[in-house]
Amino acid sequence: MRSQEQKQEPQGETKPKDPAPTAKGGKFRENLVILAVALSLSLLIRIFVAEPRYIPSDSMFPTLEMGDRLVVEKVLYRFSPPKFGDIIVFTPPGQLRVQGYTKDQAFIKRIMGEPGQLVEIRGGKVYLDNDPIAEEYIAEPPEYDWGPNLVPDQQYFVMGDNRNDSNDSHIWGFLPQQNIIGRAAWRFWPWKRLGPI
């Protein structure tokens, strides 16, 4: 009788079971799926919703400075067209591609003329439909004359806020709407100038 009792294991205590080999493989697969979904969402957001951009020049000074980092939102223009005053990011049009710029070299400028509007630059002022525009945001008045020219359909006239140091529409012409990537919406670097644009 005693020998049988000694052989019995105490009730309520069980030996820990070794994890099944498939459990480890299942966890790895689960993590892999989570990573794939996260990367896919990140890519979709960058393509369709918003993306970060870096300012490589002073062409938009003083509004934007070299080294600023921005969020470019891509949703608004799916529902309404770009408008006067918007700061946009775009791929170089054909005129700039001929000069050696590549498709992935994005530009950033301010829309100064919409389709159907008459744009002229003279005497240090920009005129839109023969009315001078008040521009508190520019570095200095333009030192050149241009136009008057009518902005064609589905195109825009864009300028840098640093009027005399900007490779913009007064040099290479109108920007096709199809080249617009999105609108500069938010500056996230440097911290001291964090905020909407």
Image: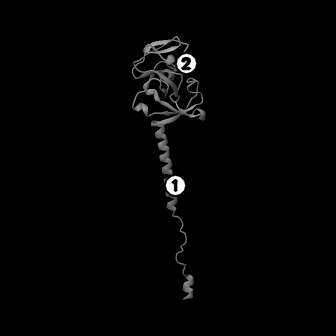
Q: Earlier in the sequence, mark 2 or mark 1?
A: 1
Q: Which residue is mark 1?
A: 28
Task: Measuring from the top left, give residue 72's x and y in whole percent.
Answer: 50, 33
Task: Measuring from the top left, give residue 108's x and y in whole percent.
Answer: 52, 26
Please tell me which residue is depicted at 41% across the width and 20% down the height of the picture: 115
Label tally? 2
Q: CA distance from mark 2 to mark 1?
A: 56 Å
Quarter-of-image position of residue 59? top right
**Looking at numbered disc 2 in the image, what kind of residue is underneath it?**
Arg
User: SS class of the residue under badge 1?
Assistant: helix
Please tell me which residue is depicted at 52% across the width and 26% down the height of the picture: 107
Task: Measuring from the top left, give residue 175's x and y in whole percent.
Answer: 46, 22
Q: Residues within 10 Å of mark 2 (few under 14, many from 20)?
A: many
Q: Which residue is mark 2?
A: 163
Quarter-of-image position of residue 155? top left
Please tell me which residue is depicted at 40% across the width and 29% down the height of the picture: 80
**Looking at numbered disc 1 in the image, what kind of residue is underneath it?**
Phe
